Amino acid sequence: ANSNVPTPPPDDEENAEKEDDLYANDEADAATLGAALRAACAIAACIVDYSRPAAVREGAVMALAHWQNGHAPAKAAGSDTTEVELWKGLSLLLSALKTLFFSEETGKLLPNDFDVSGEMVVKCAAV
């Protein structure tokens, strides 16, 4: 259960109903976040799918960046930073871009490949 929600006395029906409402909100928030993360994963998969037009892949880069901007994690109390693991959209975006533009063997940026139509559009969207 949620440790941030105080437990009401057992004989207080009004407080018990309020607690039930809080748990229902937590479940709805979790379902909404789950749906958003599934959508973010689908968008990230679109970025690396060469069968999609470059304009669609460019839009996917921008959409994922925009999604993360709207779902930035809150800072921990007394901290100047946030946990990297909480930036799910950014992690997905960087992983997709690493797959596209970095060598698996060396980890270095691959040279521009002008034979692949639209790659510069996707790179520019990433920048």
Image: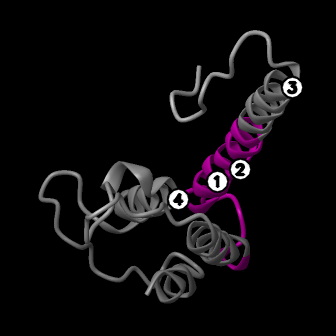
- In reply to whether residue 39 is colored magenta, the answer given is yes
Residue 122 is situated, as x and y percent measured from the top left of the image, at 54, 79
Residue 67 is situated, as x and y percent measured from the top left of the image, at 64, 67
Q: Main secondary structure of the magenta part?
A: helix
Mark 4 and mark 2 lie on one chain; the one further toward the N terminus is: 2
Camera-nearest label, 2 or 3:
3
Q: Is residue 87 left or right of residue 37?
A: left
Q: CA distance from mark 1 to mark 2?
A: 6 Å
Residue matched to label 4: 89
Is disc 2 in contact with disc 3, using a CB cutoff of under 8 Å? no
Mark 3 and mark 4 lie on one chain; the one further toward the N terminus is: 3
Q: CA distance from mark 4 to mark 2?
A: 10 Å
Residue matched to label 2: 36
Find residue 40 and name its label. Answer: 1
Residue neighbourhood size for the residue with mark 4, other residues' Cα within 10 Å, grouped as few (<14), some (14–19), many (≥20): many
Residue neighbourhood size for the residue with mark 3, other residues' Cα within 10 Å, grouped as few (<14), some (14–19), many (≥20): few
Pick the front one: 83 or 52: 83
SS type, badge 3: helix
Residue neighbourhood size for the residue with mark 1, other residues' Cα within 10 Å, grouped as few (<14), some (14–19), many (≥20): many
Q: CA distance from mark 2 to mark 3?
A: 29 Å
Is disc 4 in contact with disc 1, using a CB cutoff of under 8 Å? yes
Mark 3 and mark 1 lie on one chain; the one further toward the N terminus is: 3
Q: Please state which amino acid type lies under the numbered disc 3.
A: Glu
Residue occupying the point 75% across, 31% down:
27
SS type, badge 1: helix
Residue matched to label 3: 17
Quadrant of residue 107 within the rendered picture: bottom left
Q: Is residue 115 left or right of residue 38?
A: left
For residue 126, above or below residue 79: below
Is disc 1 in contact with disc 2, using a CB cutoff of under 8 Å? yes
Q: Please state which amino acid type lies under the numbered disc 2.
A: Ala
Mark 4 and mark 1 lie on one chain; the one further toward the N terminus is: 1
